[in-house]
Image: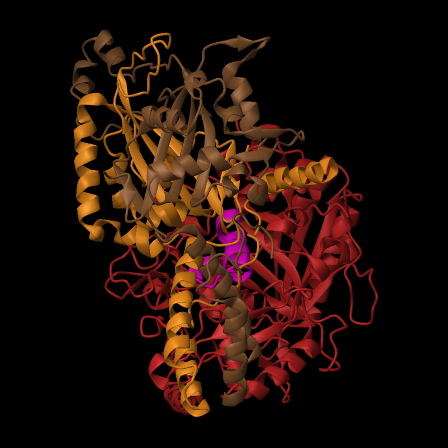
């Protein structure tokens, strides 16, 4: 069991919502999609690779065969999946303090949602409704979402520079090269394995490596 | 469809697991064990599935009962009526819901279109599990309802689509480049950082000469090589 | 709204940095409790001399609190509270980090390689239960209080043992105490420096309930949206008070009287590799375009000589002007010049790089990265990560080209939640930098740099200058942990309740 893959943390949260209220959430999500301004805090926070909200209506759980019993639910459910850097315990404060209103907006209509401040009830609410991941795969365990975005800039800048400047006179080349370094000066962060996320996660990882080495 | 954000796609799959028992173990628990026996990082089967950014598997056993302090944001009329009637008070408690099936949840964030992605998943999902056995994608989904009807790519794609749920909001805090593009960029970021450090203070001609060699070596536009392998977990 | 603290109940070391009240000498003692009853008797005796936070001078009415020659404060490890027989129900209420202690948290703190607990002063292998500090206006005053404490050990019939095993000046490893002292300049005057030559202990966090709080909060409290400063919530630093999350810190044990007005202390003995630092600075300044002193300032965020924040004095010329204004300023003005600044005009880090110690431990509003109103408040990522710093240098540098010997800083951090505050800063901001968008680049001075894979930092430049950024490379481990623990500093009331064996969470 691991909610962690390198620098990413997998969060799964399932929360009940009155079925006749889901339209409000759909509307809020639609507005958020249309107005990037509403997600400004989340974008500046820059801890998330990808996240999604999925609303499952009462009758919306997949039923594939008549032999499968029909679900008979009183609530609809909201699923939240996130891939973010750091763990929930480490970064709950950062999320709550940066975007309390946004969190409230997205979860407001869910049953017994306590609001994001004070923090402990909110922290507990998410924990209460969290489902642990069994297998989590991350294509770049050593990279945070910041690193991916930096890398995109570096690649583009390198290709451009190689086209425009590489055959100039050495002096002009150097001028452009220095400009390249200035443009990229916030994108040179080292990429190494993550600092340990928690002692228990670290212990699980060490046991995995140990047994994996033995089995090979 | 909100399930896409640019070229990035959010796939949410809930596949019901059979309510059956094999020997003394339920199908859900067998499925759970199989998920747990997937090797991680570079060795995960998902590392072979083209364009997978981040993906996960878990089993949804049931929904939770909201045994939490009353905190409804909406004014609740029952708060008043509860003073006069105990049945009104009880009605105001959260309802008890239970799922009748357990679901294998597969959630993936990937580049490109669903059909191509699922085809890649079907073809490439192979791995040696932690006990040393060669497995394919059928091993994980084996005990899901109606999965026995999946025999080829197209029936697999159909199956997954029947289990798929749309996202109301898909937030992309990263990029929507292809995975190859992302990995190549990460490789270049690390290599160019090293180059910049090593050439600090050197004269123009030397930097220029070395830069040309550098570009030849790292081949910025060649996405397949040299680059980072998917799931690379150590320097 | 003014919020008044019970200063008679709060231990003095939480509120006062004794060093700035002319207490130039300090001595730290560690004890093991051998017997619950007799141990509590010892704690009771010490309680009579525990220094409160009452302001020295005239109090309300006619009372006057005299400034003592020496102060005494007391704190406990989790094992210590067990040994003093606190009820299990109370013990279970303490947070995990405090229960485990610092050595067990080494993987989080990055105490690896030469900082690994196996290389710590050997006293940390003992059962450390009680910590007592003496701060004195003279070494004689320290000695006198120390002798008094030794008498209390006898008086309680060895209910506690004073532990030996602090490393000393001349290689001895069995000292019964850790001495610390301000450093003195060439004229013998006390100076606010530490062994690398930096001016230390300038901008501690300020919280609600402290005296003269409006003026002190400038640059030291929390930044508001309109650019003002407010004191942080008391509960960030004292249990039993509301914190920034609008709740009582959940790290408080029960009963309330045990926790109220108490806090957690991180105690660390940090050895400074002076020879390596000097060589490293010389070597790196050869390729750096500015002066050696500017480079040293880029590491810390302050100029070494007088602590001028580089964000307001980013080069030699502006530093000279800053010095002139500083010389002309009055006492309050000087304080303000040292503390009251932001990075709002330095979003590129061209003045103060993102890796500078000062910017890493307190980024002020800069984690909004210049995106106006991105967060609820500019300090959204910062206000829950603040600590109060205490401590003094220890040892003397006899040969500035060498690392060995016994010299460094006794570092103490006070906070309501070790994991959320101190450990987060140490792990996420000193030894890692994703929040600063700098990947794994560690802070230069305190980072746990790895000899096998040495790191670098980027010294940013102004994009309009045409000057490329400077890479500081091959950073060696400049500071090594030589010991430390997590302690609970109870209120004076709670110390007395512990001593009397009256703690009962029923």
Q: Residue at x 74, y 52 (%)?
A: C124
Q: Residue at x 23, y 64 (%)?
A: C226
Q: How is the image coloured?
A: by chain
Please provide percent x and percent y for residue C341: 36, 73
Q: Is residue C427 magenta?
A: yes
Q: Is residue C297 left or right of residue C364?
A: right
Instruction: Pick whichever, C250 or C464, lies toward us.
Output: C464
Q: Which chain comes out orange in the rendered image? A: A
Q: Which chain comes out brown in the rendered image? A: B
Q: State the extent of the magenta-drawn residues as a range.
A: C417-439
Instruction: Pick whichever, C316 or C203, lies toward us.
Output: C316
Please provide percent x and percent y for residue B82: 21, 14
Color used for chain C?
red
Q: Residue at x 22, y 49 (%)?
A: A38
Please provide percent x and percent y for residue C433: 49, 60
Q: Is residue A138 left or right of residue A47?
A: right
Please provide percent x and percent y for residue C97: 58, 44
Residue B208 vertical placement versus A149 (above, below):
below
Asked whether residue C19 is in view, the answer is yes
Q: Is residue B216 left or right of residue C36?
A: left
Asked whether residue C52 is in view, the answer is no
Q: Is residue C162 left or right of residue B199?
A: right
Q: Residue at x 57, y 24 (%)?
A: B33
Q: Is residue C356 magenta?
A: no
Quadrant of residue C318 within the rendered picture: bottom left
- How many numbered marks appear? 0
Instruction: Pick whichever, A67 or C213, lies toward us.
Output: A67
Residue B96 vertical placement versus C176 (above, below):
above
Quadrant of residue B206 within the rendered picture: bottom right
């Amino acid at each position: 069991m691991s909610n962690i893959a390198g620098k990413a943390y997998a969060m799964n949260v399932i929360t009940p919502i009155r079925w006749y209220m889901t339209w409000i959430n759909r509307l809020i999500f639609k507005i958020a999609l249309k107005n990037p301004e509403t997600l400004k805090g989340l974008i500046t926070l820059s801890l998330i690779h990808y996240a999604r909200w999925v609303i499952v209506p009462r009758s919306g759980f997949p039923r594939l065969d008549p032999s499968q019993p029909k679900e008979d639910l009183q609530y609809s459910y909201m699923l939240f999946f996130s891939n973010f850097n750091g763990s929930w315990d480490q970064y709950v404060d950062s999320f709550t303090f940066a975007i309390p209103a946004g969190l409230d907006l997205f979860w407001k209509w869910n049953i017994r949602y306590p609001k994001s401040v004070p923090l402990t009830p909110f922290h507990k609410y998410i924990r209460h409704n969290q489902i642990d991941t069994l297998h989590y795969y991350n294509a770049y365990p050593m990279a945070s979402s910041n690193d991916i975005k930096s890398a995109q800039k570096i690649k583009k800048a390198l290709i451009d520079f190689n086209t425009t400047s590489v055959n100039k006179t050495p002096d002009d080349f150097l001028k452009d090269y220095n400009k390249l370094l200035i443009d990229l000066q916030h994108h040179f962060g080292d990429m190494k394995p993550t600092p340990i996320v928690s002692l228990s996660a670290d212990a699980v990882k060490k046991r995995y490596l140990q047994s994996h080495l033995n089995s090979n | 469809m909100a399930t896409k954000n640019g070229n990035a796609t959010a796939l949410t799959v809930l596949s019901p697991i059979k309510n059956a028992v094999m020997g003394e173990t339920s199908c859900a628990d067998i499925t759970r064990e199989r998920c747990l026996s997937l090797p991680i990082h570079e060795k995960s089967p998902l590392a072979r599935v083209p364009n997978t950014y981040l993906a996960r598997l878990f089993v949804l056993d049931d929904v939770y009962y909201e045994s939490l302090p009353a905190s409804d944001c909406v004014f609740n009329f029952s708060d008043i009526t509860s003073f006069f009637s105990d049945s009104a008070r009880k009605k105001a408690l959260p309802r008890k819901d239970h799922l009748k099936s357990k679901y294998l949840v597969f959630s993936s964030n990937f580049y490109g279109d669903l059909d191509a992605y699922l085809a890649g998943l079907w073809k490439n999902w192979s791995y040696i599990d932690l006990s040393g056995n060669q497995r394919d994608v059928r091993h994980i989904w084996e005990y899901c309802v109606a999965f026995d009807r999946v025999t080829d790519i197209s029936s697999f794609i159909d199956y997954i689509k029947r289990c798929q749920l749309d996202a109301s909001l898909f937030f992309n805090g990263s990029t929507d480049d292809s995975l190859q593009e992302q990995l190549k960029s990460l490789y270049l970021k690390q290599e160019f950082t090293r180059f910049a450090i090593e050439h600090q203070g050197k004269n123009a001609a030397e930097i220029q000469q070395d830069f040309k060699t550098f570009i030849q070596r790292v081949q910025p536009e060649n996405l397949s090589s040299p680059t980072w392998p998917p799931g690379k977990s150590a320097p | 709204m003014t919020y008044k603290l019970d200063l008679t109940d709060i231990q003095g070391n939480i509120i006062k940095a004794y060093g700035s009240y002319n207490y130039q000498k300090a001595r730290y003692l560690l004890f093991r409790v051998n017997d619950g009853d007799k141990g509590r008797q010892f704690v009771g005796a010490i309680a009579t001399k525990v220094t409160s936070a009452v302001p020295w001078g005239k109090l309300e009415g006619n009372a006057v609190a005299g400034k003592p020659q020496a102060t005494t404060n007391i704190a406990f490890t989790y094992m210590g509270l067990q040994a003093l027989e606190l009820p299990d129900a109370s013990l279970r209420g303490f947070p995990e980090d405090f229960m485990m202690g610092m050595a067990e948290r080494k993987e989080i703190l990055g105490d690896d390689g030469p900082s690994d607990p196996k290389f710590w002063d050997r006293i940390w292998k003992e059962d450390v239960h009680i910590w007592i500090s003496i701060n004195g206006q003279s070494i004689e005053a320290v000695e006198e209080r120390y002798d008094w404490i030794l008498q209390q050990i006898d008086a309680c019939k060895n209910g506690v043992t004073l532990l030996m095993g602090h490393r000393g000046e001349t290689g001895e490893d069995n000292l019964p105490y850790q001495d610390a002292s301000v450093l003195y300049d060439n004229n013998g005057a006390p100076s606010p420096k530490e062994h690398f030559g930096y001016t230390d202990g300038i901008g501690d966090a300020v919280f609600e309930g402290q005296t003269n709080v409006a003026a002190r909060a400038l640059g030291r409290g929390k930044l508001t949206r309109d650019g003002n400063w407010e004191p942080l919530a008391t509960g960030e630093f004292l249990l039993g008070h509301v914190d920034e999350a609008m709740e009582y810190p959940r790290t408080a044990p029960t009963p309330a009287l045990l926790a109220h007005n108490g806090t957690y202390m991180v105690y660390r003995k940090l050895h400074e590799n002076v020879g390596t630092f000097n060589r490293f600075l010389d070597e790196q300044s050869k390729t750096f375009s500015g002066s050696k002193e500017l480079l040293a300032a880029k590491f810390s965020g302050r100029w070494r000589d007088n602590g001028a924040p580089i964000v307001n004095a980013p080069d030699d010329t502006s530093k000279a002007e800053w010095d002139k204004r500083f010389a002309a300023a009055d006492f309050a003005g000087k304080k303000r010049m040292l503390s009251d600044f932001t990075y709002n005009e330095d979003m590129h880090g061209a003045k103060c790089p993102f890796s500078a110690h000062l910017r890493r431990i307190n980024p002020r509003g800069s984690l909004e990265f210049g995106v106006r109103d991105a967060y609820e408040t500019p300090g959204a990522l910062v206000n829950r990560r603040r600590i109060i710093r205490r401590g003094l240098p220890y040892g003397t540098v006899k040969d500035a080209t060498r690392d060995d010997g016994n010299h460094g800083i006794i570092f103490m951090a006070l906070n309501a939640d070790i994991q959320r505050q101190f450990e987060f800063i140490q792990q996420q901001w000193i030894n890692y930098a994703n929040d600063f968008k700098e990947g794994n680049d560690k802070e230069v001075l305190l980072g746990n740099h790895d000899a096998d894979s040495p790191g670098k930092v980027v010294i940013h430049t102004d994009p309009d200058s045409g000057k490329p950024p400077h890479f500081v490379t091959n950073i060696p481990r400049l500071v090594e942990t030589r010991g430390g623990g997590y302690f609970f500093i109870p209120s004076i009331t709670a110390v007395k309740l512990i001593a009397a064996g009256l703690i009962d969470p029923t």
